[in-house]
Image (spheres, helix red, strand yellow):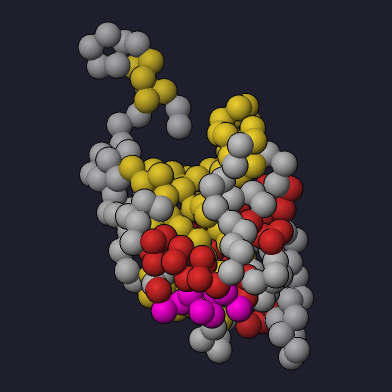
Amino acid sequence: MSSVPHPKTGQPVGELVDATPAQRPGPVTLQGRFGRIEKLAAKHAAGLWEAVKGHDEIWTYMSSYGPFENPSEFFAWVPQRAALEDPYSYAIIDASGNPVGIFAIMEIRPNMRVCEVGHVVYTPALMRTPLATEAQYLLARHVFETLHYRRYEWKCHSENAASRNAALRYGFSFECIMKQHVIAKGRNRDTAWFSMLDGDWPARKARFERWLSPDNFDGGGRQKKSLSQMQLGE
């Protein structure tokens, strides 16, 4: 946004914006073509355990938890995570009704109309599927159009190439590297920051929806054109 002169001093300041607070996330179900997202609950633990067990690599970049040694440990963690208001966690459910991932709205600041998508746990059953992308579309649409946030953030370990690439593919813009931002599991973490703004959303939404269209998939369910290949404003 451009600056404007202050009405009394003439000093450059930001433009006036709608300061009505955004809404906090709640226990909604967001249905898509390939699956849905719903509030994380203890009932998801068993299915999620089947999807995560034996895949320690999906927890490497989580700042404070995982991998889990046994189902008892995991079954105790899921309801604890589900009870938190920030991060506010959702389960990602495939078309067969199986929970295959978790993500959350976090760093929630309704008065500033800023929040973040984080704690993204994509299991191998979810990775590289249409639902993996659709879930991000459903949550972003909810954040901008229902909850009315104006800034939506994505942060990750600077060494997490997969997460950084995903942020760009989903339409987030890279902003900076925050050095020595976090001590995660006893190790230094430099954090890569990305954002999507409410003004960005219409073009991002249109691109998501072009990609999700049935016309973009062949009879075998394979994409004809990747999300990265679709230009904004096509």
Q: Is residue 143 magenta?
A: no
Q: Where, by quadrant of the figure, is residue 142 drawn?
A: bottom left
Q: Nearer the viewer, residue 216 or 74?
A: 74
Q: How many marks?
A: 0
Residue depicted at x 39% and y 61%: 80
| Helix, strand or loop: magenta stretch | helix
Q: Nearer the viewer, residue 191 or 147?
A: 191
Residue depicted at x 70% and y 47%: 160
Residue depicted at x 27% and y 54%: 23
Left or right: 212 as drawn, with respect to 147: right
Residue depicted at x 34% and y 71%: 28
**Measured from the top left, where is residue 104 in percent x and y?**
46, 58
Q: Where, by quadrant of the figure, is residue 51 drawn?
A: bottom right
Q: Is residue 46 magenta?
A: yes
Q: Where, by quadrant of the figure, is residue 203 drawn?
A: bottom right
Determine whether 161 is above or below 134 in the image: above
The magenta span reads 43-50
**Measured from the top left, where is residue 119 in percent x and y?**
52, 54
Determine whether 66 is above or below 54 in the image: above
Left or right: 191 as drawn, with respect to 41: right
